[in-house]
Amino acid sequence: MSLDSSALFTDQYELTMLSAALADGSAHRRCSFEVFARRLPDGRRYGVVAGTPRLIAALASFRFGDAEIDVVSRFLDDATLQWLRKYRFTGEIDGYREGELYFPGSPILSVTGTFAECVVLETLILSILNHDSAIASAAARMVSAADGRPMIEMGSRRTHEESAVAAARAAYLAGFTATSNLEAVRRHGVPGAGTSAHAFTLLHTTPDGPDEAAAFRGQVAALGAGTTLLVDTYDITKGVQTAVEVAGTELGGVRIDSGDLGVLARQVRSQLDDLGATKTKIVVSGDLDEYAVAALRAEPVDVYGVGTAVVVGSGAPTAGMVYKLVEVNGIPVEKRSSLKASRGGAKRAVRFARDTGTVVEEVIYPARGPRPEQDGLEASDLLVPLVRGGEAVADADTLEESRALLAAGLVSLPWEGLKLSHGDPAVPTRFADSHATGRTL
Amino acid sequence: MSLDSSALFTDQYELTMLSAALADGSAHRRCSFEVFARRLPDGRRYGVVAGTPRLIAALASFRFGDAEIDVVSRFLDDATLQWLRKYRFTGEIDGYREGELYFPGSPILSVTGTFAECVVLETLILSILNHDSAIASAAARMVSAADGRPMIEMGSRRTHEESAVAAARAAYLAGFTATSNLEAVRRHGVPGAGTSAHAFTLLHTTPDGPDEAAAFRGQVAALGAGTTLLVDTYDITKGVQTAVEVAGTELGGVRIDSGDLGVLARQVRSQLDDLGATKTKIVVSGDLDEYAVAALRAEPVDVYGVGTAVVVGSGAPTAGMVYKLVEVNGIPVEKRSSLKASRGGAKRAVRFARDTGTVVEEVIYPARGPRPEQDGLEASDLLVPLVRGGEAVADADTLEESRALLAAGLVSLPWEGLKLSHGDPAVPTRFADSHATGRTL
């Protein structure tokens, strides 16, 4: 977190509820809240849990100092203000590991403590998980579509400046190779990438007209022949020729950012080969999404640069996770109105796989009940301890471990799971007392 | 900005371009960069400029201290690092006022200075304007659809925790009445709102079962009878009855968060009136977007709560603005490849209106050329000074002034402009030397 305190990343109603609950004594009841998504975004086959380490870090700074109290004192009574001044989360959080796949109803996070200490975390928890999971879920599909070719995330300019940092992290988690975002390099250790833009070529314009060769000479002099030259500012064929003339056949790469990328990649590959620049890579960018990436699979593209689509979740900018009170003093509770009914009681989940590693189903069961078994299938527990007694557990996953977990998870999906086309969730989820279900629970 | 320095909200390529430009001397050429959107999001009729004050504030903290230099020293030469250590933007920025409407090609921001000092700001400028403008543009449509009824922004949980703060601000700019986000209350002075959620009702569950009345008693005791009670946790009709029994006929409001909101609003209004709670307001929420808000116009709804749709831009999470080099040492420059061609030269814009106030067209003209005139139409300049000699101008708009500007701007649109249905931009933009154009330039 970049602020001293994360406590005001909170909806006002959490604090008014708190004041009412403190006043009537219900605030101290032992509660479990659960994070889950009722459904995946339209047509998606899996979701990717992301943001957990950011959440744990933000939890540590969820403190009401003078500056925060000043704001909330406008609508809260003194007893509530006193309680907030001493606020420390002292409860337990279990959750799916970052990089784990999830499906409709998966109990992604389970938060246990008093009502008071849990209810105030709702917005912070959901903001982080909904954003980061939306980006990671979209990014994972792009990585699958790229089929092993490197991908650079370059969408910072299309989203809020802080979202951009978290998006770069989530994209890397999902298998992207690098990011253009320097704050993500600093804060999260994501590898950085980037060389040049059209502005640099245009800058080399004199009263005699454009001088692409001068721009390329400047870039190669500063960054070496291994750099990537952007060849589509004026005429691509001429740009490629000029690039090889200036940099030689050891030129690292050329980037194409406009036009029919498939056709152009073939033309440019052929031209580069004819010029002897057989090792020069072709980088493509420009409004790529998972479908455009997939459509370029058969083309001589070496690296993809993806911008807008990844940072806005490619049509699904939020993961739609909710944070629901499911248990009070050991009693399961649930809302009953309309379609938003939830399922009461603290829950755990187990995923069953064949001995080939392919996942068959995910079963959600009461936390107090026995863990379900299935003959001939291997069971993996999905919830791991994240916070104990208010403190983060010591052996949290690193970003690299989460990245590896997701890569392994995608391999474990049934073969339909990686299809880009719309369809049902790749793995059915069911409650231990019910039949398997598909898209919604 | 919440960080000490905003300098790493930057794409790596801006700094590699900088190093090459410093090396070959082109870095010091006098340049103009321009922010514009080639088109509006699909079917939208106008865009709303938002984020300018956040941008100006972030510009003041765009500084490379030791921490920032440490990151960029991994790929930059010493000369560039020395230059960055001394970086201060010393140029000029003109732009559309925050709250101003924009259309395809509108020169929303014009940044002038050396190439070096301007190029490094690209990502920061675009991140802020693209995010905030996307939210304000979506929110303005919702406000129009609500036709004067108050709207509360409550979408923080569906977006990145920092985006949520900026989104609350942008929604307020667009005419929303209040936000649930407490950090937006602190940081931007947006009015706060919020009372209770389902969790509070569910909390009042005992071994004997749910006790909605106890929850309502607790809330009314703490927050007064003027509070808004959430009546749809179990059975709405029973919930309304219990609410009035507990709070009396002076109950401030009831909130319905699920089901067919139109049908339920009518039923609840009738029930409240029968119970004598004729002044009790009906607040509706639950997956509302501009279309759902409009569909409820004829229903007895008093307040709308809008969440997800507004913070994700209701289908258009980014405004698609770009930052292009348009002039070098007085020479217009433009990219020529493919469809991404831009139009060179620094530009200004003027909007023509009839004496009724209705806008007829927007004309974009060369900054060095004469301002166009049109017989019988009133002309308004659209670009105002924002930064002079690197410093923010003194008389910047307040958020309230921008809010009023937008409200007035929407009234100035031709009548088709406020339609929610897909269509062309409400106001045609044209370049002074060309014919009026519609959707794209």
Image (cartoon, coloured by chain):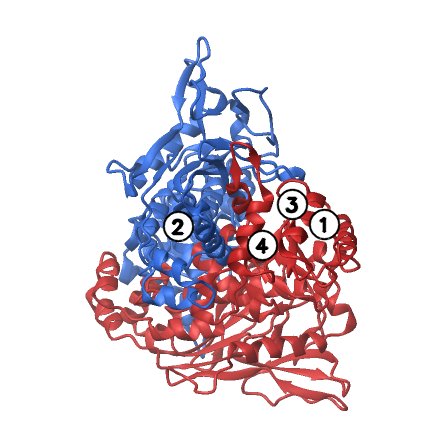
Chain colours: A blue, B red
Q: Label 2 is found on which chain of the structure?
A: A
Circle 1 sits on which residue?
B261
Cα distance in 3D space between marks 3 and 4: 18 Å
- Residue type at tag 2: Ala
Q: Judge whether residue B435 can be spotted in this image.
A: no
Q: Label 1 is found on which chain of the structure?
A: B
Point out the frontmost of discs 4 and 2.
4
Point out the frontmost of discs 1 and 4.
1
Q: Earlier in the sequence, mark 3 or mark 4?
A: 3
Q: Are the two marked residues, 1 and 3, in contact with CB atoms closer than 8 angstroms?
A: no
Callout 1 and callout 4 share a chain: yes
Mark number, residue B232: 3
Q: Give the side of residue B86 with respect to residue B108, left or right.
A: left
Q: Label 3 is found on which chain of the structure?
A: B
Q: Residues within 10 Å of mark 4 (few under 14, many from 20)?
A: many
Circle 4 sits on which residue?
B307
Q: List x then y, in percent, for residue B324.
A: 49, 69
Q: Quadrant of the N terminus of chain B?
A: bottom left
A295 or A10, nearer to the observer: A10
Q: List x then y, in percent, for residue B153.
A: 57, 60
Q: Residues within 10 Å of mark 2 (few under 14, many from 20)?
A: many
Q: Earlier in the sequence, mark 1 or mark 3?
A: 3
Give above or below for B426 relative to A356: below
